[in-house]
Image: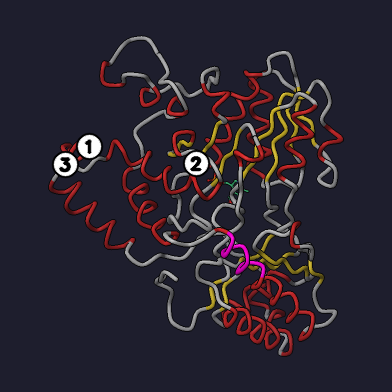
Amino acid sequence: MSTFDLPDGLVYLDGNSLGALPAGVAERLQDVVRREWGEGLIRSWNDAHWTELVRRVAGRIAPLIGVAPEDLHLGDSTSVSLFKTTVAAARLRPERRVLVVEPSTFPTDGYITAGVADLMGLELRWCDPADPLAAVDDDVALLSLTHVDFRTGAMFDLAGITAQAQARGALVQWDLCHSTGAVPVDLTGVDADFAVGCTYKYLNGGPGSPAFLWVAPRHQAAAKQPITGWFGHATPFAMARDYEPVPGVGRFASGTPPVLALSALEAALEAFDGVSLASLRDRSLELTDLFIALVEERLPGVFEIATPREHERRGSQVSLRHPSAYGVVQALIARDVIGDFRDPDIARFGFAPLYNTTDDVRTAVERLAAVIANAEHADPAYASRNAVT
Ligand SMILES: Cc1ncc(COP(=O)(O)O)c(C=O)c1O
C-alpha cells in the first residue's frame, strides 16, 4: 500500500472531505514551482509539457470511473463543471422543459440546477430521494443525481436509475464526488450521459484541486457548453476572432488550466498505481462494517446509524445521528480523531480505503466511547460552531 504523510497518532476519518497528503506530492510541487515555473518560465508550457497535464491526469482518473481518458475534462470546480454540463444537457433536449434534482443532494447541485433553470427559462423539479424516477416524465431533459449522499452515505443504484430515466427519454447526470476513488464506478457499462466529480476527497488532490467532468462520446459533437473560452477553441493560438470548439470533450475547457493544482493531483494519483478497485471496495466495506458493528456494541442506543446497512446501498462513510453531533465531533477532534459535522445532527466519518486501517476504526470507536462516557461533547466550548464544520 502506498504511503501518506499523516501526523503520528492522528486518526483521520475525513478523507471524504479533504483527502490526506500522499507521499511525494510536496516534492513534486516543489519541483514544479522551483524548476518548471521558476527556471523554465513560459518555456515550460512546451518543455515541461504543461499543455498535456489535463490529458495525463484524465488518463489516471479514467479507469477509476470506467471511461476513456479522451472523454474526460478537468480544470474547474465541481460547481462550475456542473454548470457547464447541465447547460449542455438542457441544450441537447430543447423540446423538454424540466431539470430534475433531489432536495437532499449536496446544496451546490441544487443551486446550480436552479441557476441553469432560471437562465434558460426551464422548470426546476425536486424529486423524492426515495424514488427519483417518479419525477421523470416525458418533459424531463435531465435527471441530475449525486451517487453517494454526502450526509448519510446512502448510494443510488447507478445502473438501474440511469437505464430507467433514459427509457423515459431523459438524460442522466451523476455527481461522483463521494464515489470516485472509494467506490468503483463503470460509467461506460452503465451508459450514463454526463458525470462530474471532485478530486480533493478520495483522490487526495489537495484543497481546491480541479474537478473532472465526463461527457458520453455520443453527445460530444453536439454538446454546447456555455463558457466558450479560448482553451476550448479548436486552435487557441491562431487567435481567431470567431469561436470554433475543439472536437471532443476538450470543448468544455474555458481558460488556462491550473498547472500547480493539476501537478499536485497528478502526483497524488500515483497512490492508485497497482491498486485494484475491487480490493479498494472490499477494504472500504470492511472498514465501514467494522465501525458500525463496534459503535453498536460499545455504544448501544447512543447513536442512530443513518447509513444504510446493505452494501449495495452504502458508499464509504458512516454517519451517526446525535442531538449533540457537533460537540461529539469537536470532542473527538480534541482526542485526535478527525471526522466532521453536517447540519443538523450528523457526525460523519469517511473511510478512505487507500490509507485507513482497521486499527483506525478501533481507535476511533474507543475514543468515541470515552467522549460519551465523560460527556465531553457537552463542553460549553462547543456551543458555537466554527465556520467550517
Ligand atoms: C457531492 C458534492 N458535489 C459538489 C460539491 C462541491 O464541489 P466544488 O466545491 O468543487 O464546487 C461537493 C463538495 O464537497 C460535494 O460533496
Foreground residue, 131 or 310? 310
Amino acid on which the number 3 mark rests in the picture: Leu
Foreground residue, 64 or 96? 64
Question: Is residue 387 in sight in this rendering?
Answer: no
Cα separation, mark 1 vs mark 3, equals 8 Å
Is residue 61 toward the left or the right of residue 382 in the image?
A: left
Q: Residue at x 75, y 78 (%)?
A: 293
* Residue 389 in the image: above or below residue 169: below
Q: Residue at x 16, y 49 (%)?
A: 38
Lower position in the chain sequence, tag 2 or tag 3: 3
Q: Which residues are magenta?
A: 278-285
Identify the disc placed on residue 45.
Answer: 1
Mark 2 surroundings within 10 Å by alpha-carbon count, few (fewer than 14), some (14 through 19), many (20 or more): many
Label 1 residue SS:
helix
Could you say which quadrant of the image residue 240 lies in? top left
Identify the disc placed on residue 41.
Answer: 3
The nearer-to-camera label among 1 and 3 is 1
Is residue 371 found inside the magenta-colored segment of the image? no
Amino acid on which the number 1 mark rests in the picture: Trp
Q: Residue at x 51, y 67 (%)?
A: 354
Q: Position of residue 351 (x, y in %)?
A: 60, 68
Q: Which residue is mark 2?
A: 212
Q: Position of residue 279 (x, y in %)?
A: 57, 65
Mark 3 surroundings within 10 Å by alpha-carbon count, few (fewer than 14), some (14 through 19), many (20 or more): some
